[in-house]
C-alpha cells in the first residue's frame, strides 16, 4: 500500500475544504490511499497518520506552505518520517518556506519545489504506478 499525504502549513483562514491533489491521487490506484493534516491538527491525528505511514511501503508527501507559518503539529510527523526516510518516495513543496526547505534538502532529488499542479500530477501518477 502507498500513501499520499498532504500537509498544509497555511493560515487556517486560507485552508480549503477541497483537496484536488488528494482526490486525484486517491483515484489513481486501488493500493493508494490519501491522508491530510495541517499545522493545527491535534497530536492524536498525527499519531494516527504516523501509524499509517509505518504500514505503507511508500509515501508521497505534498506540502502547501506559506513562509511565515509555523510547523505546529506537523513537525513531529516530518521529523519522524525524515528519521526513517527510506519510505519517502518524494516530497513536493508548493509555496515558500525556508525552514521546510532546510529540513528537506538532504533528501536530494526526492525533494522538489513546485507550484505547477500539472507537473505535480505527473509525479503523483508516477508514484501511483511505481
Image: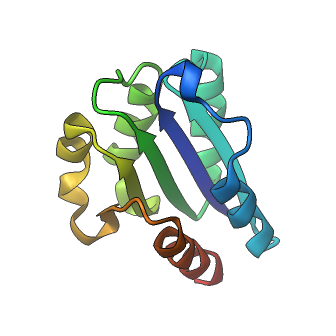
Between residue 70 and residue 104, name the one nearer to us: 70
Q: Is 114 situated left or right of 107 in this image? A: right
Q: Quadrant of the C terminus?
A: bottom right
Within the image, what quadrant is residue 30 found in? bottom right
Residue 72 image point, x, y percent: 42, 19
Residue 56 vertical placement versus 8 (above, below): below
Residue 101 image point, x, y percent: 22, 46
Q: Name the residue: 49% across, 53% down.
A: 62
Q: Name the residue: 46% across, 60% down.
A: 87
Residue 35 vertical placement versus 22 (above, below): above
Residue 73 vertical placement versus 123 (above, below): above
Residue 117 image point, x, y percent: 52, 65
Q: Is 94 situated left or right of 51 in this image? A: left
Q: Is 33 situated left or right of 106 in this image? A: right
Residue 124 image point, x, y percent: 57, 71
Q: Name the residue: 49% across, 69% down.
A: 120
Please indicate, yes or no, whether residue 84 appears anywhere in the rendered image. Answer: no
Within the image, what quadrant is residue 57 found in? bottom right
Please indicate, yes or no, whether residue 117 appears anywhere in the rendered image. Answer: yes
Q: How is the image coloured?
A: rainbow
Q: Quadrant of the N terminus?
A: bottom right
Between residue 79 and residue 115, name the one nearer to us: 115
Amino acid at each position: 500500500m502507498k500513501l499520499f499525504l498532504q500537509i498544509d502549513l497555511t493560515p487556517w483562514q486560507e485552508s480549503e475544504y477541497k483537496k484536488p491533489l488528494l482526490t486525484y491521487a486517491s483515484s489513481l490506484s486501488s493500493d493508494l490511499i490519501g491522508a491530510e493534516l495541517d499545522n493545527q491538527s491535534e497530536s492524536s491525528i498525527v499519531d494516527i497518520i504516523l501509524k499509517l505511514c509505518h504500514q505503507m511501503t511508500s509515501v508521497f508527501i505534498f506540502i502547501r506552505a506559506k513562509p511565515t507559518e509555523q510547523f505546529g503539529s506537523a513537525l513531529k510527523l516530518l521529523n519522524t518520517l525524515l528519521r526513517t526516510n527510506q519510505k519517502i518516495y518524494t516530497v513536493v513543496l508548493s509555496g515558500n518556506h525556508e525552514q521546510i526547505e532546510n529540513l528537506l534538502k538532504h533528501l536530494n532529488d526526492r525533494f522538489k519545489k513546485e507550484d505547477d499542479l500539472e507537473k505535480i500530477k505527473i509525479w503523483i501518477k508516477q508514484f501511483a504506478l511505481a
